[in-house]
Image (cartoon, rainbow, N blue to C red):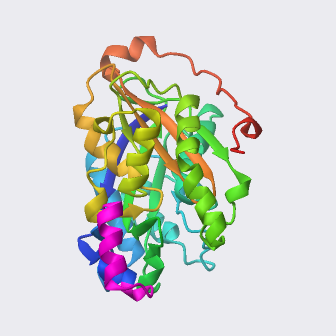
Amino acid sequence: MRLASLVSHIPAARLSAEDIIRAAGGSPVEARVFERMFGLDHVAAVPEGETLSQQFDQVLQKLTASHTGPRPDALIYVHGQPLQYAAGQSPVQVLCANQPVLAEITRRYEVDQYNCGGLFWALDLARTLLNAGLAHAVAVLGGDSHIGLPLGDRYVPGCTLMGDAFCGMILDQMPGGLQVGDVAMCTHPRFARGRAGTATEMGDFFAAHGGIVSQSLARIGFDWQGDCALLPHNVNRLAWQMFCRETGLPQSRLRLGLLPDIGHCYTSDPFLLLEQERPALSAGQSCAILSIGMGGYAGACMITQTATASSTAQSKPAPTAKEHHPCSQLILS
């Protein structure tokens, strides 16, 4: 499956870690310690007075400018917070009515039950639609905002600060370009309570994070001894430093450059990083993208830069069957 187009939008506004933590009842000292330990200084935020639809308008304008293939006829909208919209209030309806790139959409789907892993479930759904002939190109929109929510809701004590950022992509079955490998998805039910869990349950999840990451990377054939980059969810700097110490993975293979400025953005993190990494990938090179949702939803895949479509059009490979791994064998004890 080809990732034909990929764009992102990071809102211009920023909120300081101290303001967020104090709004959640923390002290200035707690905020300073958090910043030093976890490497989070600010988060990106939708500017006051702007709407969610306006953010996706900017994503879709970029998609329109960058995409040269057929218009998508299916749309998958992904957000990490399991918050259903009231009837007629989803931004998707407005976007489909007003954005030319979505003018041919006949199928609409919403993915909202997989926390920060949701875009990987969307990739898998897109592949299913394409393989079944139910779509010839699939648009995927991802990202959450905290519009209308209390400032302190952005703080997850001992873990992260939530920012706002958005991405969009179009997927098809053309050869060449960025190719999406098998998507590894797994759920870990013991962590299903997510942010609603007790302090003990949250602590268990944080302690298991590195193991879940390692399992997900093993399932997609990540080359631990090679040099391909790992583009992860921006949970915090400390978690990834610990992961590198535990596994021996050089920190130079991680991409954490966005973390201090924009925070951890629901669902979108690895795709924001992929847009940055893409120009550095030459033909034959790969990178890994990965996200672990707080409810124990793990998603990962390899992205490979191949030769251009024009040079491979006569040798399009046949789709391969997706490899299945029973999640029961991967749940941490």
Residue 114 visible in rendering: no
Relative depth, front residue between 221 and 107: 221
Please report the residue visible at 66 percent of the width from the left and 70 percent of the height from the top. 197
Image quadrant of residue 311? top left
Q: Position of residue 31 (x, y in %)?
A: 34, 77
Is there any visible trace of residue 132 in the rendered image?
yes
Q: Quadrant of residue 322?
A: top right
Tell me which segment is drawn in magenta: 22-39
Q: Residue at x 69, y 50 (%)?
A: 188
Quarter of the image for residue 123 reads top right
Q: Nearer the viewer, residue 276 or 130?
A: 276
Q: Residue at x 73, y 54 (%)?
A: 189
Q: Which image quarter holds the C terminus?
A: top right
Q: Main secondary structure of the magenta part?
A: helix
- Residue 315, image x and y in percent? 44, 11
Lateral position of residue 9 relative to residue 79, left or right: left
Q: Is residue 58 left or right of residue 247?
A: left
> Quick one: 161 or 198, which is closer to the camera?
198
Q: Residue at x 52, y 45 (%)?
A: 210
Q: Please, is residue 244 above or below residue 146 in the view?
A: above
Relative to 85, 309 lies left or right: left
Residue at the extreme top: 315
Asked if the magenta segment contains residue 209, the reply would be no
Q: Is residue 11 above or below residue 321?
A: below
Q: Position of residue 267 (x, y in %)?
A: 48, 57
**What count of labels does the image hold?**
0
Q: Position of residue 70 (x, y in %)?
A: 41, 40
